[in-house]
């Protein structure tokens, strides 16, 4: 959505996003990874060349305070964890869009017909050099 536009349309979209945010379910950040491993026993099925190994063993990895934290996810919780990660991504998308729409609404409400927005004016555009004025207390006698 554009950052500027019709204030009424932006208000409607802002309210729609707020409604969607109210329906956000359980969520969690991170990446879910299924890993296969070989146990190292020479007679195990995983020792064969074409075998994929044991697994998958599922883990959820995410950054916390500059460190990587890994949590093992039981096989029966993998689908639920995927849904929670998707919900987290939805929350991130919605909050980003809410900020963008809100900023556009704020800008749209600042616009006054016939007035040039402050960012559109160029610094020093008057063509006259500025004159410095000293305060009366700083003048020397």
Image (spheres, rainbow, N blue to C red):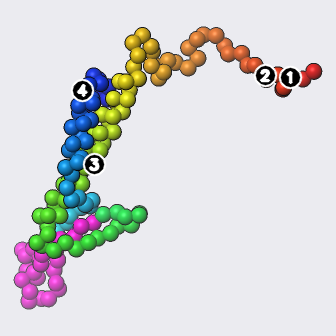
> How far apart in space, not on screen, are marks 4 and 3 (Cα)?
22 Å
Q: Position of residue 77 (x, y in %)?
A: 14, 69
Q: Is disc 2 placed on a helix, strand or loop?
A: loop
Q: Earlier in the sequence, mark 2 or mark 4?
A: 4
Viewer-closest of 123 and 118: 118
Q: In the figure, residue 133 lies in which quadrant? A: top right
> How far apart in space, not on screen, are marks 1 and 2 (Cα)?
7 Å
> How far apart in space, not on screen, are marks 2 and 4 (Cα)?
50 Å
Residue 9 tag number: 4
Q: Residue at x 30, y 42 (%)?
A: 96
Q: Residue at x 24, y 36 (%)?
A: 15
Q: Earlier in the sequence, mark 3 or mark 2?
A: 3
Residue 139 tag number: 1
Q: Is disc 4 placed on a helix, strand or loop?
A: helix
Magenta stretch containing residue 69, yes or no?
A: no
Q: Which residues are magenta?
A: 35-61
The residue to which callout 3 is attached is 92
Q: Is disc 3 placed on a helix, strand or loop?
A: helix
The N terminus: image quadrant = top left
Q: Residue at x 17, y 77 (%)?
A: 37
The residue to which callout 2 is attached is 134
């Amino acid at each position: 959505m554009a950052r500027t536009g019709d204030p009424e349309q932006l208000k409607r979209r802002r309210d729609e996003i707020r409604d969607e945010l109210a329906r956000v379910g359980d969520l969690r950040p991170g990446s879910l990874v299924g890993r296969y491993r070989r146990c190292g026993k020479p007679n195990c099925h995983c020792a064969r060349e074409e075998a994929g190994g044991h697994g998958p063993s599922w883990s959820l990895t995410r950054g916390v305070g500059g460190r990587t934290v890994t949590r093992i996810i039981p096989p029966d919780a993998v689908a639920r964890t995927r849904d929670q990660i998707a919900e987290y991504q939805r929350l991130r998308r919605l909050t980003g869009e809410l900020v963008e729409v809100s900023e556009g609404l704020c800008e749209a409400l600042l616009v006054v017909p016939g007035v040039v927005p402050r960012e559109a004016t160029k610094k020093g555009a008057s063509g006259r050099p500025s004159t410095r004025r000293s305060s009366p207390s700083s003048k020397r006698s």
